[in-house]
């Protein structure tokens, strides 16, 4: 089998194995990305959920921050939960890292931990407009961020949960505030891989 692309999964922290499995089930080749050489070998990237502050500390400490930031400006990227926090132009709750605290590639504004603590995590079904139809997808929210603003000219909302945008797209960047990799549905990964 020959592959036209290699989907990278940032493997610093968080649920990266589950993303890798989902993408491999769809028939794509994947690579876990932990350094510059691995980043240079992929042409798209999934940034998993986990803990955005831990990822920022590790990426900055190991000199990966600027590399990733420029990668995200040039290639398709898919951020889930903490990944969305990192893709946003503005994320509230990262002020301790100074001005340069996100990759700043999507014109969205988010608030971290907006639904409360771990015990306030929840699972629900959402309607998502993807791949030309409306699909029902299961969604797990774990200490999720909330999108409180976005540029309506640039960003498309593909799904809402109780009035809040939870799946958004800007060109080749996709962001969701929940964890699609923790369910059996491959719809969102499939959509990203085809971008
Ligand atoms: N609360 C986490 C953060 O701020 C995100 C949680 C998640 O990715 N499930 O980074």
Image: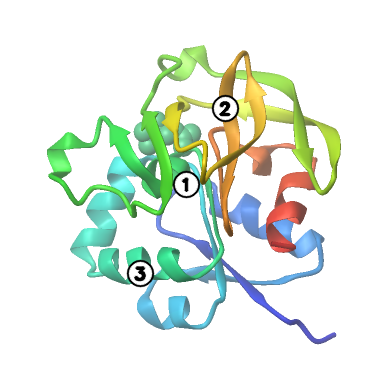
Q: Which mark is residue 72?
A: none
Closer to the N terminus: mark 1 or mark 2? 1
| Disc 3 target residue | 70
Give the left or right position of residue 166, taking residue 134 as reference: left
Q: Nearer the viewer, residue 144 or 175?
A: 175
| Residue at mark 1 to residue at mark 2: CA–CA distance | 23 Å
The crowd level at tag 2 (other Cα within 10 Å; few <14, some 14-19, many 20+) is: some
Question: Depth check: 174 or 8 in front?
Answer: 174
Q: Which residue is mark 2?
A: 165
Residue at 56% across, 64% down: 76
Find numbered disc 1 in the image and state the secondary structure of the residue it sits on.
loop
The residue at label 2 has a CB less than 8 Å from ligand 1: no
Foreground pick, 78 / 55: 78
Q: Residue at x 22, y 60 (%)?
A: 60
Q: Is residue 50 visible?
A: no
Can you tell which quarter of the image residue 85 is in? top left
Give the residue number, with chain letter if any, for mark 1: 14
Side (left or right) of 3 relative to 160? right
Q: Which of the two discs, 3 and 1, sits closer to the camera?
A: 3
Tell me how far mark 3 sits from mark 1, CA to CA. 22 Å
Horizontal and vertical percent for residue 117? 41, 16
Q: Name which of mark 2 and mark 3 comes first in the sequence.
A: 3
Q: At x 45% / y 82%, what residue is drawn? A: 40
Kindly check if marks 3 and 1 are in contact, taking CB atoms under 8 A apart as contact. no
Q: Which quadrant of the structure image shows residue 124?
A: top right
Disc 1 residue: CB within 8 Å of ligand 1: yes
Give the SS element for disc 3: helix
Ligand 1 quadrant? top left
- Vertical placement of residue 124 versus 76, above or below: above
């Amino acid at each position: 089998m020959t592959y036209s692309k290699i989907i990278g999964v940032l493997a610093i922290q968080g649920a990266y194995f589950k993303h890798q499995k989902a993408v491999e089930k769809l028939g794509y080749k994947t690579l876990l990305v932990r350094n510059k050489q691995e980043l240079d070998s992929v042409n798209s990237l999934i940034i998993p959920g986990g803990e955005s502050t831990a990822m920022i500390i590790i990426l900055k400490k190991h000199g990966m921050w600027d590399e990733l930031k420029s990668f995200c400006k040039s290639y398709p990227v898919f951020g889930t939960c903490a990944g969305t926090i990192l893709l946003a132009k503005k994320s509230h709750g990262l002020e301790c890292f100074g001005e340069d605290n996100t990759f700043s590639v999507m014109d969205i504004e988010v608030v971290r931990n907006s639904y409360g603590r771990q015990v306030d995590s929840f699972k629900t079904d959402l309607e998502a407009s993807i791949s030309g139809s409306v699909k029902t997808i299961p969604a797990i929210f774990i200490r999720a961020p909330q999108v409180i603003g976005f540029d309506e000219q640039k960003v498309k909302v593909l799904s809402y949960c109780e009035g809040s945008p939870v799946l958004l797209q800007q060109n080749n960047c996709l962001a969701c505030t929940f964890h699609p990799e923790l369910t059996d549905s491959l719809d969102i990964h499939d959509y990203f891989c085809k971008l």
